[in-house]
Image (cartoon, rainbow, N blue to C red):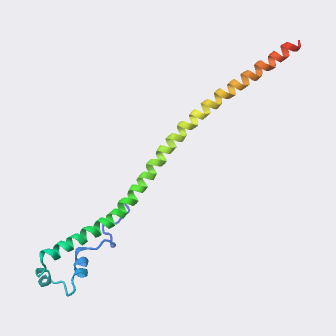
Amino acid sequence: MSNNPVFDPSIPVLTEVLVEKATEPCGPEALAAWGESEWAALEQRLCERIVQQLQGRVDFVLEQRLRDSMAEVLQHAITGLTSEIRAGLQDTIDSVVARAVAQELAHLKAHK
């Protein structure tokens, strides 16, 4: 994630949120007039907005890491499975060839 900028313009800064909240200019006088309920509402909105934006990023990173991990695990499983199949196939071929040779030799001995 090193290619992500330090400042993401899609995440609002506090002053932008304050401007959205205020119906009149958001100067120190207007902020001083805010009561506890207005500050609590602002805090709630900020938290919800930040969590929502972070969740999208977390989901993306989690999905990417899961894909990378699954690719590694699947590659390891495929390598192991390929080895097992190769060994089983080799045993089967050895058995089939040995049986065919034995049958052919028995057939040749019977015709002598």
Q: Does residue 33 appear left or right of residue 99 in this picture?
A: left
Residue 1 appears in the figure: no
Q: Position of residue 30 (x, y in %)?
A: 14, 84
Question: In the image, what residue occupies the spot 46% across and 48% down?
Answer: 70
| Residue 90 x/y as whole percent | 65, 29
Q: Is residue 39 above or below residue 59?
A: below
Residue 102 placement (x, y as % from top left): 76, 18
Name the residue at 30% across, 69% down.
7
62 vs 78: above or below: below
15 left or right, relative to 3: left
Quarter assignment of residue 28: bottom left
- Residue 20 appears in which quarter of the rendering? bottom left
Quadrant occupied by the C terminus: top right
Q: Nearer the viewer, residue 47 or 37?
A: 37
Q: Can you see residue 14?
A: yes
Residue placed at 45% from the left, 51% from the top?
68
Total marks in image: 0
